[in-house]
Image (cartoon, helix red, strand yellow):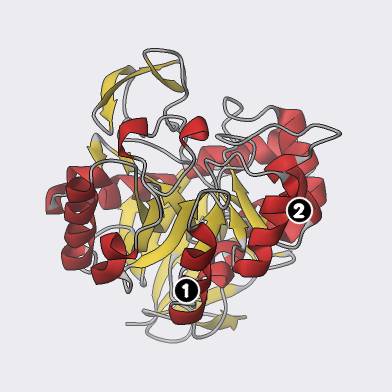
């Protein structure tokens, strides 16, 4: 059935448009002046409407984690994310045992098409091919050198791999994946690479950077490191805009330098959309309090950020415009993945979110179906 959203401020790729009607079924049909006869009407009552949000890096929410490796965990995450305006995401794994990673990947492969809420676009493999010196909240005991055997059965499901380009054997690994599996985004992260090493990896096939500034060497005027290489290059990057992982000044600087190469993520763990308390991440105890998730030694352990809150913080604390902020969680990640989502454009998937001035989510639609209403 054709549906029509009326009285919405429609957020396009470069402007906000009022006084129009958004028409869709499972796909976006177009933007019209009037409601066609027979269309089911959704009244936005003056709120904003945009393409649904895409999170490229999220471990869990609602008390569940991708590494739980159960169908119910994926369903819980999928359902919980609807309240944040997220309509699709990469199910993100972490550095654990080979068996645990394989089981989690198998679970995503078998059940990603069966969830009823936000769609699972595939897997973001965060580790285990990282630098032990920049392990962050990843369990150092399970870090390993690049190993094609670990992921050989899951190449179709994997859409992103975070790795450290300076570790032994990684160049051949990156080049092989770039040649044989171009749909997989290779991302520098949890890395201690020098500026020159990082720049070289862009030539091998690395095209992205994971949670820029976090779990990597710091910028120094004589050794710019990963950050310097990313900021001056044409690669995309993502950042956690929770004001915990990154200072507002850092967010502003990154926005000014990267513009349409910047993607916002949550890196949320199972405590996302939950109350403060004691949780678990990769077998490690995590204390969640006042918007921070930390291991017992004080190491940041992912976040509890909601993607709509991240948008609100970027608009409030940087010069990023509303349209640019929305693009950073819609059009830009969708184009990075090469999928027909992220824009209110004819023929694109009808993943739509309606939200208030303060980015509070009113309703969320996935493939044209109303899945969440406040």
For residue 215, which quarter of the picture? top right
Residue 26, how many percent across, how many down?
Answer: 36, 79
For residue 17, which quarter of the picture? bottom right
Residue at the image point whose x is 38% and y is 54% from the top: 125
Residue at the image point whose x is 35% and y is 47% from the top: 81
Check the image and report above or below for 97 versus 148.
above
Residue holding disc 2: 258
Residue 43, how many percent across, how many down?
Answer: 47, 61
Q: Please rate how many residues cluster around mark 2, counting C-alpha atoms within 10 Å: few if below 14, some from 14 to 19, many from 20.
A: some
Q: Which mark is residue 95?
A: none
SS of the residue under disc 2: helix
Residue at the image point whose x is 57% and y is 79% from the top: 345
Residue 75 visible within the image: no
Q: Quick one: quadrant of the C terminus?
A: top left
Q: Which mark is residue 176?
A: 1
Q: Nearer the viewer, residue 196 or 159?
A: 196
- What's the CA distance linking mark 2 and mark 1? 28 Å
Q: Nearer the viewer, residue 194 or 262?
A: 194
Residue 156, how many percent across, how many down?
Answer: 32, 74
User: In the image as oriented, which residue stretches furthest toward the right?
Assistant: 221
From the viewer's perspective, tell me whether residue 213 is left or right of residue 103. right
Looking at the image, is mark 2 or mark 1 earlier in the sequence?
A: 1
Residue at the image point whose x is 21% and y is 52% from the top: 104
Q: Please rate how many residues cluster around mark 1, counting C-alpha atoms within 10 Å: few if below 14, some from 14 to 19, many from 20.
A: some
Mark in the foreground, 2 or 1: 1
SS of the residue under disc 1: helix
Residue 120, how many percent across, how many down?
Answer: 32, 62
């Amino acid at each position: 059935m054709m549906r029509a959203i009326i009285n919405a401020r429609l957020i396009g790729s470069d402007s906000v448009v009022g006084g129009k009607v958004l028409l869709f079924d499972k796909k976006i049909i177009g933007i019209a002046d009037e409601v066609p006869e027979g269309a089911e009407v959704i009244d936005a009552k003056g709120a904003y409407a945009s393409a649904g949000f895409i999170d490229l890096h999220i471990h869990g929410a609602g008390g569940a984690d991708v590494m739980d490796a159960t169908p119910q965990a994926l369903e819980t995450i999928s359902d919980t994310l609807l309240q944040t305006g997220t309509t699709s995401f990469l199910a993100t794994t972490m550095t654990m045992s080979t068996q645990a990673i394989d089981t989690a990947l198998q679970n995503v492969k078998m059940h990603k098409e069966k969830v009823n809420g936000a769609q699972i676009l595939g897997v973001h493999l965060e580790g285990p091919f990282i630098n032990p010196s920049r392990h962050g909240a990843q369990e150092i005991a399970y870090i390993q050198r690049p190993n094609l055997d670990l992921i050989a059965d899951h190449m179709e499901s994997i859409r992103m791999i975070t790795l450290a380009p300076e570790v032994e054997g990684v160049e051949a690994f990156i080049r092989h994946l770039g040649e044989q599996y171009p749909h997989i985004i290779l991302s520098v992260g949890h890395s201690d690479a020098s500026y020159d090493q990082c720049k070289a990896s862009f030539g091998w096939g690395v095209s992205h950077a994971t949670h820029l500034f976090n779990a990597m060497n710091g910028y120094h005027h004589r050794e710019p490191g990963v950050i310097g290489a990313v900021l001056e290059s044409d690669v995309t990057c993502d950042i956690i805009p929770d004001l915990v992982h990154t200072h507002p000044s850092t967010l502003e600087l990154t926005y000014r330098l990267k513009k349409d190469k910047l993607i916002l993520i949550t890196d949320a763990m199972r405590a996302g959309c939950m109350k403060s308390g004691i949780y678990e991440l990769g077998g490690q105890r995590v204390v969640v309090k006042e918007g921070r998730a930390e291991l017992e030694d004080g190491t940041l352990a992912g976040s509890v950020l909601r993607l709509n809150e991240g948008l609100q913080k970027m608009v409030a604390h940087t010069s990023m415009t509303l349209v640019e902020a929305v693009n950073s969680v819609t059009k830009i990640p969708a184009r990075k993945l090469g999928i027909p989502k992220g824009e209110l454009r004819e023929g694109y998937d009808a993943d739509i979110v309606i939200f208030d001035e303060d980015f509070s989510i009113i309703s969320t639609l996935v493939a044209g179906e109303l899945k969440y209403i406040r």
